[in-house]
Image (cartoon, rainbow, N blue to C red):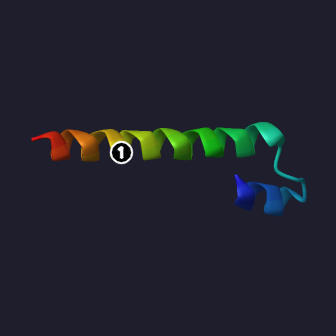
């Protein structure tokens, strides 16, 4: 996404940066969920 923006000379759209943030949050929650499940054993 960032590479594409740099290549085309256009700025990254807000929706793309929001999608990236949402993806990071989901991954963090997923990892946290696994960690909590591991600790609960």
In the displayed orientation, state which residue is furthest to the left: 41
Q: Is residue 29 left or right of residue 24?
A: left
Which x, y percent locates residue 37?
21, 39
Image: 8 above or below 20: below
Q: Residue at x 49, y 38 (%)?
A: 26
Q: Quadrant of residue 6?
A: bottom right
Which x, y percent locates residue 30?
37, 40
Q: Residue at x 26, y 42 (%)?
A: 36
Residues packed near mark 1 inside 10 Å, few (<14), some (14 to 19) or many (20 plus)? few
Q: Is residue 35 left or right of residue 27?
A: left
Instruction: Tell me the quadrant of the picture where the C terminus can be found.
Output: top left
Which x, y percent locates residue 8?
85, 56
Q: Residue at x 53, y 42 (%)?
A: 25
Q: Is residue 12 left or right of residue 29?
A: right
Image: 12 above or below 26: below
Q: Residue at x 77, y 36 (%)?
A: 15
Disc 1 marks which residue? 32
Which x, y percent locates residue 28?
45, 46
Identify the secondary structure beneath mark 1.
helix
Task: Pick whichever, 7 or 14, lies toward us.
Answer: 14
Task: Pick whichever, 40 or 18, lies toward us.
Answer: 40
Q: Is residue 11 left or right of residue 40?
A: right
């Amino acid at each position: 996404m960032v590479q594409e923006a740099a290549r085309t000379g256009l700025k990254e759209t807000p929706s793309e940066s929001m999608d990236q943030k949402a993806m990071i949050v989901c991954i963090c929650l997923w990892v946290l969920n696994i960690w909590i499940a591991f600790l609960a054993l």
